[in-house]
Image: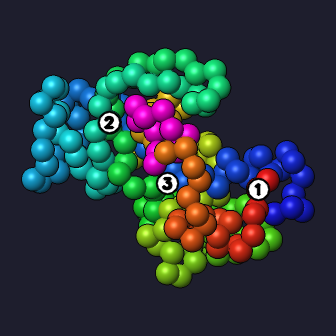
Amino acid sequence: MRFWSTRTRSIGRLLIVAMALTAASCSPDNRPYHPKPGTSYDPATGLPLEIISAKDGVEMVLVKAGAWKKGRPNGTALRTKIQAFYIDKYEVTNEAYCRFTSATHRATPAFPAPGAAVLQWVNGRYAEGRGRCPVVLVSFEDAAAFADWAGKKLPTQEQWEYAARGTQRGEFPWGNSKLPPADCNTADRLAGRELFG
């Protein structure tokens, strides 16, 4: 979207990232979660590898404690340790976010961006057929409110990076090279051109 200013483009990138939520900790006691039926357990901690959130019914997966190099793999990177945590298995969907806005009367996503009509909600509803798609165009404040409503919290930068990268040193979860555009669903592929330089 080359007509955006640099500042607006940067803000837009932040707002279009789909939300993921983490559980507060990995303590198995007094939690509003239950193990997913048939799940395995981590032999080191005894924690279930997958749980179901009682509040929103969402599957969460255990990200085991570990250490990795935080930051760009080819630049300055600090070795960072992280405790185990649970994170939503999938992004927050439009359906789930609609349940939240209906229950709390919070504003629905809105961000005036020409060409993004399919992403926008109209009259408090998402576009038809997009209920199971990730919700986008959500402000940080609304994302935090959703997390609180769901009995969770937003992942920290370290949790997000570790969950995405793991202990591997690659730039991407699959290695150091970008995937060919035909092999993944990206905004660039859907638009048929590079959106962000």
Circles 3, 2 touching at the beta carbon (< 8 Å)? no
Identity, as a three-letter code, of the amino acid under mark 3: Thr
**Most frequent secondary structure within the magenta stretch:** loop
- Does residue 106 appear in the picture of this structure? no
Q: Separation of disc 2 and disc 1 at Cα?
A: 31 Å
Secondary element type, mark 2: strand
Going 21% across and 42% down the picture, which residue do you hit? 49
The residue pinned by badge 1 equals 196
Identity, as a three-letter code, of the amino acid under mark 1: Phe
Q: Separation of disc 3 and disc 2 at Cα?
A: 30 Å
The reply, left or right, for residue 104 in relation to residue 39 is right
**Around disc 1, counting alpha carbons within 10 Å, would you say few (fewer than 14), some (14 to 19), or many (20 or more)?**
few
Q: Which of 155 and 108 lies nearest the eye of the viewer?
A: 155
Secondary element type, mark 3: helix
**Percent position of residue 44, x then y:** 15, 25
**Percent position of residue 141, x then y:** 61, 42
Vertical placement of residue 14 versus 44, above or below: below
Vertical placement of residue 7 versus 3, above or below: above
The residue pinned by badge 2 equals 63
- The magenta stretch is 165-174
